[in-house]
């Protein structure tokens, strides 16, 4: 596990006393590359699934509001798929809601905040050379700038 963590380190941030705002050069490009790569796929496909789910739910609700009051079908061959959908618009709307929920879950799995991207990939070191990576709080200020505080 140690070797995997060492390979994923992108850099080191040297903490200085009385300084809380740091500029991490190249962070925004690395973060953008990460979002465009494999981390962006769950977000994209989650949003697509949410759009499809919304359309299916809207179809079910639309059929419930403006669909036919009476559905005629052949007794021997049974209802067609369209007639079955017209007879059960609630199931269609629920299926759309399920697709939206799955899409939202998948989208949220792919979202990684800048702070969560920075902490495991950068090493935080004090002036005396002590690694304090597990004892810092980080807030993203925009671009390559971060507000870093050392938790005592």
Image (spheres, rainbow, N blue to C red):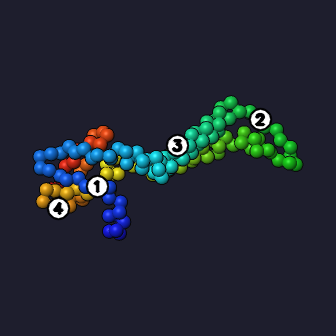
Q: Against 140, is 129 above or below? A: below
- Please tell me in which quadrant of the rendered image residue 22 appears: top left
Q: Nearer the viewer, residue 45 or 33?
A: 33
Q: Earlier in the sequence, mark 2 or mark 1?
A: 1
Q: Marks 3/2: CA distance?
A: 36 Å
Q: Which residue is mark 2?
A: 70
Question: Distance between the Cα atoms at labels 3 and 4?
Answer: 43 Å
Quadrant of the image containing the N terminus: bottom left
**Structural crowding at the residue carrying mark 3, measured as other residues with C-alpha within 10 Å and reported as few (<14), some (14–19) or many (≥20):** many
Q: Nearer the viewer, mark 3 or mark 4?
A: 4
- Is 143 left, or right, of 92 in this rendering? left
Q: Secondary structure at mark 2?
A: loop
User: Is residue 145 among what the camera can see?
Assistant: yes
Q: Which residue lies at the image location 35% right of the left edge and 63% below the top edge? A: 7
Q: Which mark is residue 11?
A: 1
Label 4 crowd bin: few (<14), some (14–19), many (20+), radius 10 Å: few
- Badge 4 marks a residue whose secondary structure is loop
Please tell me whether mark 3 sits on a helix, a strand or a loop. Answer: helix
Q: Nearer the viewer, mark 2 or mark 4?
A: 4
Q: Which residue is mark 4?
A: 130
Which quadrant: the C terminus?
bottom left
| Residue at image coords 47%, 50% | 37
Q: Which comes sooner in the sequence, label 3 or label 1? A: 1
Sequence-earlier tag: 2 or 4 = 2
Residue 138 image offset from top left, x and y in percent: 25, 48
Name the foreground residue: 48 vs 55. Answer: 48
Tag 3 near tag 4, CB within 8 Å: no
């Amino acid at each position: 596990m140690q070797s995997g963590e060492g390979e994923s380190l992108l850099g080191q941030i040297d903490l200085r006393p009385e300084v809380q705002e740091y500029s991490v050069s190249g962070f925004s490009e690395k973060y953008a590359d990460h979002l465009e790569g494999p981390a962006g796929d769950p977000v994209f496909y989650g949003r697509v699934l949410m759009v499809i789910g919304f359309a299916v739910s809207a179809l079910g609700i639309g059929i419930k509001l403006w669909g036919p009051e009476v559905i005629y079908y052949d007794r021997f061959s049974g209802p067609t798929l369209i007639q079955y959908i017209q007879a059960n618009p609630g199931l269609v709307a629920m299926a759309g809601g399920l697709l939206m929920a799955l899409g939202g879950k998948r989208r949220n799995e792919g979202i990684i905040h800048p702070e969560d991207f920075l902490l495991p990939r950068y090493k935080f070191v004090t002036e005396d050379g002590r690694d304090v990576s597990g004892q810092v709080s980080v807030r993203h200020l925009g671009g390559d700038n971060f507000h870093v505080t050392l938790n005592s």
